[in-house]
Image: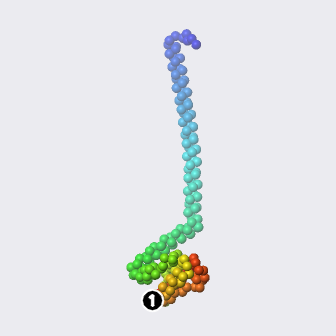
Amino acid sequence: MINLLPDSEKKSLYYVKTFDALIAIAAYCVVFSLIITITSLALFYYLYNVEKLLSHQLESYLSNKEIQYVKDLEKQFEDFNSDLVLFKNEIIKKGVISPILKQLIKEIPEEIKLKSLIYSTDKNNQKIILSGSAATRESFLSFIETLRQDKNYKDIISPLQNIVKSVNIDFSITILL
C-alpha cells in the first residue's frame, strides 16, 4: 500500500496507530487483571468456606463423647503407668522379691521356657504364677521337684493337666511363698 500523504500527516497517522495499539494493550491488561482478581476472590471465598467447614467438623469431632471417653482412658493409662513405675522403684529399693526371683531364675532348666511370671500378694500369702512350656514331661517333673526341694517356697501347686502330654507341655504352676 502506497501512502501518498505528506510527512506531517504520516507522523500523525503513526502516532494514532501507536496510541490505538497502546490503548488496546492497556485494555487487555485491565481485562486480564479483572479476570485474575475475580478468580482470586472466588478461590479465596472457596478456601475460606472449606476452612470454616473443617474447623466446625474438628470442633464437633473433639467434642464427641467417644473421643472424650478415649482421652479419659488415655489419661487413666498414663496415671496407671506412672503408678507402676513408682511401684517398681519401691520394689527395687526394698529388694523384697528380687532374691527369690534370682533363685527361681537359677532353678529354671534350659528345657523350660517361661511365657509369663505373675507375682501377687494379699494379707496372708505371696505367690508367683509361672506359665510356660516344657520340652518333655520328665524335664517338667524335674523342674517341679527342684522347686519343691527349695525351702523358700511353702508349696508348689501344679494341676494334673500339666503332665497329660509327654512332649511340648504347656503348663501353669503356682508357687506359694
Query: Does residue 135 appear left or right of residue 151 in this picture?
Result: right
- Name the residue located 58 percent from the left edge and 48 percent from the top edge: 46
- Mark 1 = which residue? 151
Q: Nearer the viewer, residue 150 or 92?
A: 150
Q: Amino acid at mark 1?
A: Lys
Q: Residues within 10 Å of mark 1 (few under 14, many from 20)?
A: few
Residue 87 in picture, x, y percent from top left: 44, 78
Residue 67 in picture, x, y percent from top left: 57, 66
Q: Quadrant of the N terminus?
A: top right
Q: Nearer the viewer, residue 175 or 108?
A: 108
Residue 81 in picture, x, y percent from top left: 47, 73
Q: Nearer the viewer, residue 173 or 86?
A: 173
Q: Say what secondary structure mark 1 lies in.
A: loop
Query: Is residue 145 shown above or below 61?
Result: below
- Name the residue located 57 percent from the left edge and 41 percent from the top edge: 39
Query: Does residue 99 appear left or right of residue 4 in this picture?
Result: left
- Name the residue located 50 percent from the left edge and 83 percent from the top edge: 143
Query: Is residue 140 shown above or below 78?
Result: below
- Name the residue located 57 percent from the left edge and 76 percent from the top edge: 168
Determine the image quadrant of residue 65: bottom right
